Amino acid sequence: MKYLIQIYSNPESRAMWESFSAEQQAEGYAYYQGINDELSSSGELVASEALADVSLAKRVTHTEDRTTASDGPFAETKELLAGFYLVDVDNETRAVEIAGRFPEAEFGLIEVRPVLDMAARGDV
């Protein structure tokens, strides 16, 4: 079953990351790469990506005759999506186990959500 592991950041977690030296940040990136490599080797990784800074986000609206993109995040919030892992694992317990390995879990900034199988629902 597929699960989306969403990794969020907030002012406290961002401040901690920004306080790290370049060497500590490199170690952090290496830690995530290790998880990527492990999940890829086990066949559980479908995709993972870190997201660019929220200041580069676009809010998209559509009316009858036009689509418009404006600057900035779509909502005022202190917690922002920083990245994600899409995993295909045996059960929710395994997805939660993987999610608990991310440092952001210490801040309560990880969300695990099942992915709907639209084909199985007959919606596709």
Image: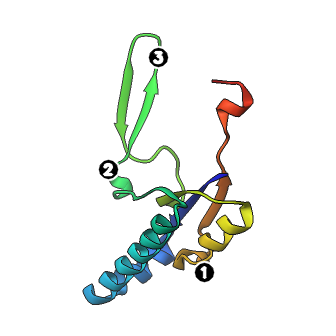
Image side of residue 66 versus residue 112, left or right: left
Which residue is more in the foreground, 49 or 58?
49
**Image quadrant where residue 97 sits:** bottom right
Residue toward you, 51 or 113: 113
Q: Cβ–Cβ below 8 Å for labels 1 and 3?
A: no
Residue at numbered disc 2: 56
Mark 1 vs 3, N-terminal side: 3
Q: CA distance from mark 2 to mark 3?
A: 23 Å
Residue pointed to by mark 1: 106
Name the residue nearer the viewer: 50 or 1. 1
Residue 80 against residue 98 in the figure, above or below: above
Q: Can you give x and y, in whole percent of width and height, for residue 116 in the image?
A: 67, 41
Residue at mark 3: 63
Q: Amino acid at mark 2?
A: Leu
Mark 1 and mark 2: Cα distance apart in space: 27 Å
Residue 85 lies, with reference to residue 37, above or below; the image says above
The picture places residue 105, in percent across and down from the top left corner, at 60, 75
Q: Position of residue 3 (x, y in %)?
A: 63, 54
The residue tagged with tag 3: helix, strand or loop? loop
Tag shown at residue 39: none
Q: Residue at x 30, y 82 (%)?
A: 26
Q: Residue 24: x percent and y percent?
A: 33, 88
Q: Is 52 displayed left or right of 63 in the figure? A: left
For badge 3, the amino acid type reads Thr
